[in-house]
Image (cartoon, helix red, strand yellow):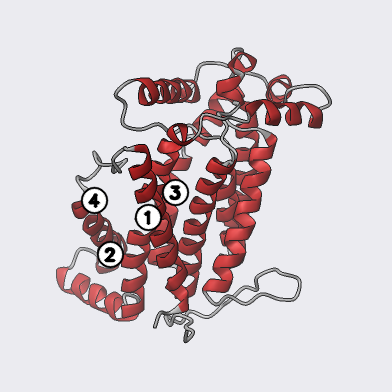
Amino acid sequence: MYRRAYTALVATALAIGLWAIITAQVVDRPLIDPESSFLGPSWLRLPILCFGALALDMVPRALWRSGGRPRVALEVVRERWRSHWTRERLLLVMLGIIGFYVIYVCYRNLKSFLPLVSDRIYDRELHLLDRALFFGREPGPVFHDLLGTTVVAHFLSAFYLLFIPMVAILVTVWLVWARNISHGWWFVTSQGFAWTLGTLSYYALPTLGPGLEYYWLYDNLATTGTTDLMNALVNARQDFRFGDGETQTVAGFASLHTGISLLWALMVQFTVQNRWIRIAFWVNFGLTVVATLYFGWHYIADDIAGITIAFVSFYLAGLATGQKFDHGGLASHPTSTTSKIPVSQD
């Protein structure tokens, strides 16, 4: 008997885990921990992340409210533990971190295996579609002419490279501080769906992306962190295919930068009341779409597919975690601060 609020997350982690194991056997490559150098091996890192989330909530609060008085700080910690760190919250944090970690590690491995599974790429087809949509021109150069190739390049590059740390940060924020427990499950489950659907899209339509396949269209851009990252990705891919490299991370369709950024904006729109935070996340989504085309990370079709993945993941995770949807298909704004998880009996 499973609670509906987390059955979907566990099932998704098991499904992509099985997929990764089978694929690793087929291509005769080991499954690896892509972040093994950070905080040690996974058996150590996962407890650190769980206890770190607890400390991140408790310690600053106790120091701020106690004014440096140990006895008062201890009382603040006890009160926070009773009111916030309920059994449901602990389950959300522990299972959410572990479930998302499994999905993300499998995503990274399956993405890495892609060149070994299929050598067919569809860049030419998507490139022709881009030209048709831009009336014979290339989307990247159009943005270069419109925005310039120096100051904007440095700004968009710095902005775009913030995506990876934000992935883990925002998962932690919703798991630890979502006032409504179901919102935490909604966020982490939708993330699990999105990363899994994104992996499926890589295998359905393998591409490299215009910045790698048609690199000369982007030679006029200023050298930025994005330039260095693209060069590193190309080298890693070649080393993986023809040398002794352990992993590669090149796959264009769909754009998960676009999909995950939209998913963040949707979650903020329907679970956060602050207007300026909502605006900030929608701006983040818009700039992400521009950056994908400006640097040649993705084709227009990649962004459209990423947007589709975001809406599908958002809606299905909402259903899985007991959110209310009206007849128009938009989620209502739940206001309850209860720690109870919506459940269903299977």
Q: Mark 4 and mark 2: span between their CA atoms?
A: 18 Å
Q: Disc 4 marks which residue?
A: 42
- Which residue is the extreme one toward the right? 135
Residue 68: where, in percent of width, then height? Answer: 20, 63
- Which residue is the extreme one toward the bottom? 345
Mark whose residue sits in front, 4 or 2:
4
| Mark earlier in primary sequence (4, 2) | 4
Residue 276: where, in percent of width, then height? Answer: 60, 55
Q: Mark 4 and mark 3: span between their CA atoms?
A: 18 Å
Residue 14: where, in percent of width, then height? Answer: 38, 61
Q: Mark 2 and mark 3: span between their CA atoms?
A: 18 Å
Q: Quadrant of residue 124?
A: top right
| Mark earlier in primary sequence (4, 1) | 1
On residue 54, which mark appears? 2
Residue 192: where, in percent of width, then height? Answer: 47, 58
On residue 17, which mark appears? 1
Query: Pointers 4 and 2 in contact (CB under 8 A)?
Result: no
Type of residue at label 2?
A: Leu
Q: Disc 3 marks which residue?
A: 167
Tell me if residue 301 comes above or below residue 71 in the rendering. Answer: above
Q: Quadrant of residue 91?
A: bottom left
